[in-house]
Image (cartoon, helix red, strand yellow):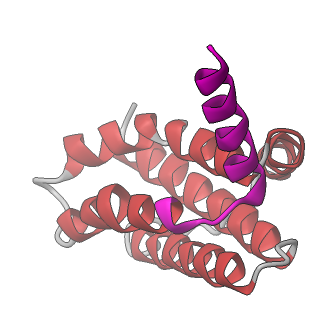
Amino acid sequence: MDITKKVNMIRRSEITEHEFYSRLSKRQKKESNQKILKHIADVELSHYNFWGKYSKEEFKPNLFKVYFYLIITWIFGLTFGVRLMERNQRKIKKIYQEMIHYITGLDFIIKDENEHEQMHIDEIDEQRLKFIGSIVLGLNDAL
């Protein structure tokens, strides 16, 4: 795959993630979760804009993926849906590693992807997850 195709694939992925996190943040009742998801959405948009220096083509989000992950999140919970979305970023992260020596500032994007987003995802407070954790602990005590 040539560089232009890689950059375009990355831009499409970043704008799709931005759309997912933006929509997800608007659906949250907890203000703390809203802020975290909004921040992640803003970071994804900044990544999209960063790659705009290398590709003048504008992209729209892949709405199929956005709605797919929103439905997954609705069924299995916020933490599961967000972690699944991030897990699918592995292909993009491999491309980042391939291009790090050619693109100035990419090391900052990689750091952002690896550290900051993971830290924010860990801050998400989900009542359903706590409830399931309590059930598991209760079952463990019963055994």
Q: Is residue 127 among what the camera can see?
A: yes
Q: Is residue 60 among what the camera can see?
A: no
Where 16 falls versus 36 (above or below)?
A: above
Question: Which residue shows up at 49% across the image and 76% down it?
Answer: 43
What's drawn in magenta, residue-wise? 122-143
Question: Which residue shows up at 75% across the image and 47% down it?
Answer: 131
Instruction: Give whichever of 2, 118 is nearer the camera.
Output: 118
Residue placed farthest to the front in the image?
142
Question: Which residue shows up at 42% across the image and 36% down it?
Answer: 90
Q: Quadrant of residue 12?
A: bottom right
Question: Which residue shows up at 70% across the image and 45% down it?
Answer: 81
Residue 114 lies left or right of residue 65; in this view the side is left
Give the prevailing secondary structure in the magenta stretch.
Answer: helix
Task: Please provide percent x and percent y for residue 106.
Answer: 24, 64
Where 105 falls versus 8 (above or below)?
A: below
Is 54 colored magenta in this rendering?
A: no
Instruction: Give whichever of 2, 106 is nearer the camera.
Output: 106
Residue placed farthest to the left in the image?
101
Task: Please provide percent x and percent y for residue 108.
Answer: 23, 70
Task: Please provide percent x and percent y for residue 94.
Answer: 31, 37
Number of marks: 0
Q: Quadrant of the C terminus?
A: top right
Residue 54 lies left or right of residue 78; in this view the side is left
Instruction: Give whichever of 135, 2 is nearer the camera.
Output: 135
Where 56 falls versus 74 (above or below)?
A: below
Residue 101 lies left or right of residue 3; in this view the side is left
